[in-house]
């Protein structure tokens, strides 16, 4: 918790009135309780209360002035503005991206590479009627723009399940020179032209019903799986109006799976093999979704209101980014998965954080009590 920018937290609490008329359970304690739940994989409010009550003598050292009651935590999640934790996550993301700015992604490129995708979190229609999705169930969507150096999310938007993927492009400010990698769900030529006009590049897959004509063909490296490398112009009435410039169309056959893919991009400078490799890197965002669903509590929610759900999601994102920051600042040569697994079994221990990740042989000491007999002779 020493890595949390508490000055910024206090500023956000004042901005959104989080502690107005609050006497006992302040927003800083709410964050600590929810972060504890994320780090130790608690399944419910009752679970959080029981685990914290099991160590009453250590609560003060963890930042709690009073025992945490599940009803108090539920009210805090229900009533206190979730935008506090959204803004805190944004602060942590900016800090993390500075730490990972020099990390590579395995490609010899100076451009910043982003992967854009969304994941759907299914909810019960009876308990979450506000999260409109289908006639039989509710859902929320996490639209995520992942900086592949890290990987660190640079943008996250939480919406109901009905929001289309392409609409997320309206929420992103294109960065000149950056490359945005996305799947076919984001093929909206009016919105993609906004990225082109901002001097940003995109790599996506073409839809099978796209109407176009070939303008020029480049030599294709068949040995690298490149079947065709063409400049094309769109023929559809609306598509040609929305995107009047030429596009680059690359047909690629994956040598490992023999799967054939067709890529669209507005970058005519990079080799076709690099474009194909960039699209393969898009799977990092899929792995990010898989990782947070497996290792953070965003599939089982502690409250049913929109405010409680978004509070839990944004604190989960903050914990993920905070773990990435700590891992980098302490120069820990372990994965984020191992990092969280070790922390999950040592939340009540009072020791420097770096010591928790030393090898067991370095920290284990044999008891020296004279009243204890030796069971085995060496």
Image (spheres, rainbow, N blue to C red):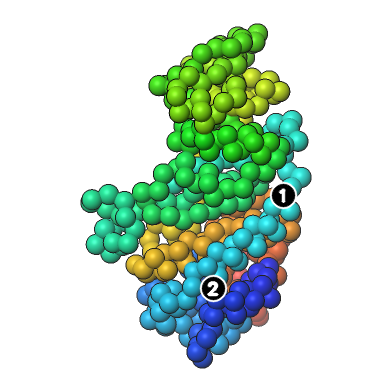
Taking depth in this image into account, of 176 and 158 the one nearest to the observer is: 176
Q: Quadrant of the C terminus?
A: bottom right
Please give the name of the residue rendered at 61% of the width and 51% of the height, measured from the top-left corner.
154
Please give the name of the residue rendered at 26% of the width and 58% of the height, measured from the top-left corner.
125
Examine the rendered structure and indicate whether residue 365 appears above or below residue 110: below
Classify mark 2: helix, strand or loop: helix
x and y, in percent, of residue 98 in the image: 74, 53
Q: How many marks?
A: 2
Q: For the residue carrying disc 2, how many other residues have a C-alpha within 10 Å: few (<14), some (14-19), or many (20+)?
A: many
Say whether residue 190 is visible.
yes
Q: Which mark is residue 190?
A: none
x and y, in percent, of residue 37 in the image: 48, 68
Q: Which mark is residue 100?
A: 1
Say whether residue 373 is visible.
no
Classify mark 1: helix, strand or loop: loop
Instruction: Say whether disc 1 or disc 2 marks the residue closer to the N-terminus.
Output: 2
Please give the name of the residue rendered at 54% of the width and 24% of the height, measured from the top-left corner.
263
Please give the name of the residue rendered at 40% of the width and 48% of the height, measured from the top-left corner.
163
Examine the rendered structure and indicate whether residue 155 appears above or below residue 212: below
x and y, in percent, of residue 370 in the image: 65, 80
x and y, in percent, of residue 372 in the image: 60, 77
Examine the rendered structure and indicate whether residue 263 appears above or below residue 168: above
Gap in Å between the C-alphas at discs 1 and 2? 25 Å
Taking depth in this image into account, of 46 and 266 the one nearest to the observer is: 266
Q: Quadrant of residue 268?
A: top right
Residue at the spot of label 2:
31
Tell me if 313 is positioned left or right of 155 in this view: left
């Amino acid at each position: 918790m020493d890595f949390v920018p508490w000055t910024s937290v206090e500023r956000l609490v004042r901005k959104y009135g989080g502690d107005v008329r609050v006497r006992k359970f302040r927003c800083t304690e709410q964050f600590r309780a929810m972060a504890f739940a994320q780090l130790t994989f608690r399944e419910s409010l009752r679970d959080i209360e029981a685990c914290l009550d099991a160590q009453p003598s250590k609560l003060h050292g963890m930042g709690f002035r009073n025992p945490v009651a599940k009803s108090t935590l539920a009210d805090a999640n229900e009533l206190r503005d979730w935008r506090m934790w959204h803004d805190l996550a944004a602060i942590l993301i900016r800090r993390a991206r500075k730490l990972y700015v020099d990390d590579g992604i395995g490609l010899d490129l100076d451009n910043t590479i982003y992967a854009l995708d969304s994941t759907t979190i299914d909810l019960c229609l009876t308990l979450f009627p506000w999260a409109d999705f289908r006639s039989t169930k509710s859902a929320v969507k996490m639209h995520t723009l992942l900086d592949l150096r890290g990987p660190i999310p640079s943008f996250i938007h939480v919406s109901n399940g009905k929001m289309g993927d392409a609409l997320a492009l309206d929420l992103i400010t294109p960065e000149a020179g950056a490359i945005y990698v996305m799947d076919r769900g984001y093929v909206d030529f009016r919105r993609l032209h906004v990225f082109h006009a901002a001097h940003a590049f995109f790599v996506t897959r073409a839809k099978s019903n796209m109407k176009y004509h070939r303008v020029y063909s480049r030599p294709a490296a068949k040995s690298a799986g490149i079947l065709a490398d063409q400049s094309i112009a769109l023929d559809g009435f609306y598509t040609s109006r929305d995107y009047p410039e030429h596009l680059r169309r690359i047909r690629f056959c994956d040598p490992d799976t023999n799967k054939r893919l067709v890529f669209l991009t507005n970058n005519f400078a990079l080799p076709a093999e690099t474009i194909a490799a960039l699209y393969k890197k898009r799977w990092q965002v899929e792995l990010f979704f898989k990782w947070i669903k497996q290792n953070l509590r965003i599939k089982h929610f502690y409250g049913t209101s929109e405010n409680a759900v978004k509070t839990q999601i944004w604190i989960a994102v903050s914990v993920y980014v905070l773990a990435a920051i700590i891992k980098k600042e302490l120069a820990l040569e372990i994965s984020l998965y191992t990092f969280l697994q070790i922390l999950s079994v040592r939340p009540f221990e009072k020791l420097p954080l770096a010591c928790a990740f030393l090898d067991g042989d370095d920290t284990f000491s044999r008891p020296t009590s004279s009243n204890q007999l030796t069971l085995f002779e060496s």
